[in-house]
Image: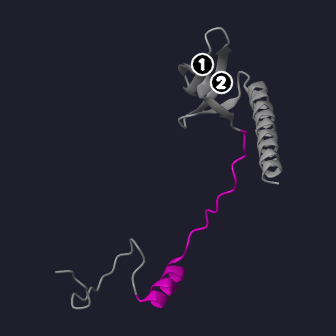
Amino acid sequence: MDQYFLIIIIVAFAAFMFYSSRKRKKQQSETASQMVPGARVMLSFGLYGTLVSVDDEKVTADVEIAPGTVITVHRQTLSRVVPEETPEAVDTTATTEHETDDVTELNGEPIYGERVEDVDTTKRKTED
C-alpha cells in the first residue's frame, strides 16, 4: 500500500513540474512577442524605458530611458512589457480652513504642519 502511495506522489509531482514548465514557456513566448521596438518595458532592476531595438545575435537590447539617452542591456534584463495606462483623475480639491479647524478641534492636537500660535510649554511631554 505504501508503494502505491509513493508512486502516486511521484507521478503527481512529475505532472505538476511538466505543467509548470509548459505554463512558463507559454508566458515567456507571449512576453517575447510583445518585446517589439516602441514597447514600454521594465528592466529586472526596476528601470523603465522604451525598447529601441533587440539584437538576437549579441543577445542585447537598446532601451531609451530618457529622451536622447539610450542604454544597451542584456536581453534577459527585459523583465516585462508595461501596458500603457491612462492617468487616473487626481482629486485636486483643497480643504478649506473650516475643515481643518474641525479636525483640530476633534483631536485637540494640531494637524501635522499646522502652526500653533499659543503654545503652553507645561503641557508638553519631554523625555529626560
User: Label 2: few (<14), some or many (≥20) within 10 Å?
Assistant: many
Label 2, label 1: how far apart the Cα atoms are:
6 Å
Residue ID for mark 2: 51
Magenta span contains residue 69: no
Residue 41 image offset from top left, x and y in percent: 65, 32
Magenta span contains residue 95: yes
In this rendered view, identify the residue nearer to me: 3 or 83: 3
Q: Is residue 64 above or below residue 14?
A: above
Please indicate whether residue 74 sits to the left or right of residue 105 in the image: right
Residue 88 image offset from top left, x and y in percent: 70, 53
Residue ID for mark 1: 62
Tag 2 secondary structure: strand
**For the point 33% across and 80% down, which residue is it?**
116
Residue 87 image offset from top left, x and y in percent: 69, 48
**For the point 72% across and 39% down, which residue is it?**
84
Range of magenta residues: 83-108
**For the point 55% across and 73% down, which residue is it?**
95
Q: How many marks?
A: 2
Tag 1 secondary structure: strand
User: Label 1: few (<14), some or many (≥20) within 10 Å?
Assistant: some
Most extreme residue toward the top is: 57
Residue 110 image offset from top left, x and y in percent: 39, 81
Tag 1: amino acid: Asp
**For the point 74% across and 23% down, which residue is it?**
36
Quadrant containing the C terminus in the rendered view = bottom left
Quadrant containing the N terminus in the rendered view = bottom right
In this rendered view, identify the residue nearer to me: 63 or 28: 28
